């Protein structure tokens, strides 16, 4: 999990795929955090992506660093605890202008039953489950 976290931090922007009814949706994201040994992302509850995740928590992330790419799939679980939100926002202080650990909009979600696949054109895929 640490390797996945470091890869996502390094690339900065990754792409999160969700399902909206029968339509795939992909959008850029940039938050990633480890809290209590779980990999978290962050969004706002008022956004369509939050609704999509709650309707179907199975998601996939794709990120590319110029030579290797990561596909991370699993289910996202919402964590409404102030401590989890505060930890994320402390990692991304620029978000504190839009979000607060105590507001009703900030949402942090962690991966459950995750499978990370690191790939490149020159080596066999490496699979990490957590």
Image (spheres, helix red, strand yellow):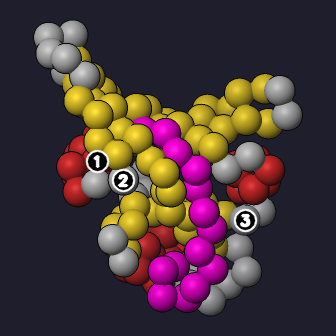
Crowdedness near tag 2: few (<14), some (14–19) or many (≥20) residues, C-alpha within 10 Å:
few
Residue drawn at point x = 78 percent, y = 26 percent:
23
**Foreground label between 2 and 1:** 2
Q: Nearer the viewer, residue 36 or 98?
A: 36
At mark 1, the secondary structure is helix
Which label belongs to residue 130?
A: 2
Q: Is residue 37 left or right of residue 94?
A: left
From the top left corner, tell me how far across and down residue 68 is, in percent: 23, 25
Q: Is residue 125 visible?
A: yes
Where disc 2 sits, the SS reads loop
| Foreground pick, 116 / 19 | 116
Q: Residues within 10 Å of mark 3 (few under 14, many from 20)?
A: some
Discs 2, 1 touching: Cβ within 8 Å: yes
Magenta stretch, residue numbers? 72-85
70 in magenta: no
Residue at image mark 3? 45
Residue furthest toward the top? Answer: 121
């Amino acid at each position: 999990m640490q390797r996945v976290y470091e890869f996502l931090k390094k690339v900065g922007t990754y792409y999160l795929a969700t399902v909206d009814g029968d339509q795939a949706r992909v959008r850029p994201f940039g938050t990633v955090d480890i809290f209590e040994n779980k990999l978290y992302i962050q969004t706002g509850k008022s956004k369509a992506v939050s609704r999509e995740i709650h309707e179907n928590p199975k998601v996939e992330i794709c990120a590319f660093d110029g030579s290797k790419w990561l596909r991370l799939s699993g289910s996202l679980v919402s964590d409404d605890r102030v401590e989890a939100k505060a930890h994320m926002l402390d990692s991304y202080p620029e978000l504190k202008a839009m979000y607060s650990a105590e507001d009703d909009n900030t949402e942090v979600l962690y991966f459950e039953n995750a499978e990370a696949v690191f790939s490149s054109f020159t080596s066999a895929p490496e699979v990490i489950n957590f």
